[in-house]
Image (tube, grey):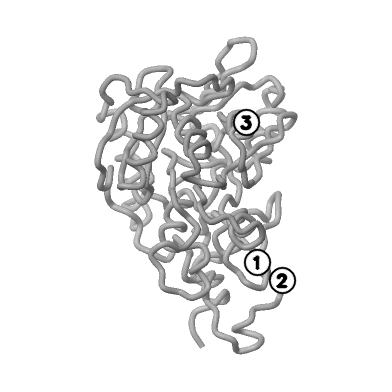
Amino acid sequence: MGKNYLDLKAEVWDTGICAACGACVAVCPADAIYFKTGEESTRPFNNGYCKEVVDGVPCGACYATCPRLDPAPTEMFGKYIDIFSAKADILIPGKQSGGAVTAILVNALEQGLIDAVVTVEEDPWTLKPSSTVITSEDALISQAGSRYNWWVPLVSSLKEAVITRKYRSVAIVGVPCVVQAVRKMLDSDHDLLRPFKRSVRLVVGLFCTETFDYEKLVEDKLIKERSIEPMDIVHFDVKGKLEITMRDGSLTVIPLKEIDECVRPGCKVCTDFTAIGSDISAGSVGSPKGYTTVIVRSSAGKAVVENAIENGLLSKGSDVDMQAIEKLSTRKLARKQEKKQ
């Protein structure tokens, strides 16, 4: 018998290092792995069935795609072709920083370079996030600015996109642990991962220091302790502190130390700030206000970015402040040493 969910449970779920990326949910052929919400949302659960454990049929797909089974990344920037600031040249009302990611994806959909985007959407009333599959330009624009600053098992919707709806040119937008999981799918020779390997065309990684538990951050810290209503929030940003922009134009700043208990447990062992395994990485750090830092890492990433520029949906800005990115990358890389002590 090979490695299966019991090994994954022992090595990752029960040790507190689960990224909660949702990759194991997406690739389980028996739909036997799932997440709960609330206090028990830090790791997946199994419904008691596993085709390998119960029926002796080789599987191990969940084990093969877990990002936490690999050594933690030690690179600050990773390999890249180009790095620059950019902004969307289309109207994106809720954009985060320069709206570059939305512009790139909208153009890719319009040009038929991709047919679906697996990403995060949120309830406009509560700001509660959920994993979703988006297939229209209008839907992408309306969901621009999704916070990505609290957790959702994002990769779980990849099953809907690839297996259920049979899209064959899928883009995935996610934080570094999501990128790591998807990269394992793309690099694997595992038979059960081949449908995903054939269908994922573009991986967009978002700069990330850590993600937060929705209930602990929004429901407890913001609503109960600070009387901040989700409907009054325009967007979040994390740049060494949590910045919350309100609809009235005011800015609420919360030191990360005050919300440390809201950080997802698995984030505390992650060392990757810039999503080094993606085709394109993006974030606000390093670029002036109104612009997005874009790191182009692959030929696929270069092609979609250049196409967006050629079609007038994206424009380049000034040089990037590399030291600003290095500062947060260094802080995150230090987690590897902290874990050893």
Residue 50 relative to residue 204: left or right: right
Kind of residue sitting beneath label 3: Asp
Please tell me which of labels 1 and 2 falls first in the chain: 1
Picture coordinates of residue 193, whole percent (x, y): 50, 69
The reply to whether dot 1 and dot 2 touch (C-beta < 8 Å) is: yes
Q: Which mark is residue 138?
A: 3
Q: Residue at x 53, y 56 (%)?
A: 168
Category of crowding for the residue at label 3, using alpha-carbon neighbours closer than 10 angstroms: few (below 14), some (14–19), many (at least 20): few
Q: Residue at x 53, y 59 (%)?
A: 16
Residue 28 relative to residue 283: left or right: right
> What is the spatial separation of the Cα atoms under label 1 and label 3, in whole angstroms?
32 Å
Category of crowding for the residue at label 2, using alpha-carbon neighbours closer than 10 angstroms: few (below 14), some (14–19), many (at least 20): few
Please tell me which of labels 3 and 2 falls first in the chain: 2
Picture coordinates of residue 310, whole percent (x, y): 36, 28
Of all residues shown, which one is farthest toward the right?
Answer: 125
- Quarter of the image with the C terminus in it: bottom left
Kind of residue sitting beneath label 2: Asn
> What is the spatial separation of the Cα atoms under label 3 and label 2, in whole angstroms?
37 Å
Kind of residue sitting beneath label 1: Ile
Picture coordinates of residue 196, whole percent (x, y): 51, 62
Q: Which of 247 and 159 is in front in this view?
A: 159
Q: Which mark is residue 47?
A: 2
Q: Which residue is drawn at 25% across and 29% down?
A: 323
Residue 139: quadrant of the picture: top right
Picture layout, residue 65 above or below residue 233: below
Q: Is mark 2 on a helix, strand or loop?
A: loop
Q: Which residue is drawn at 58% across and 24% down?
A: 235
Residue 28 relative to residue 102: left or right: right
Residue 57: quadrant of the picture: bottom right
The residue carrying mark 1 is 33
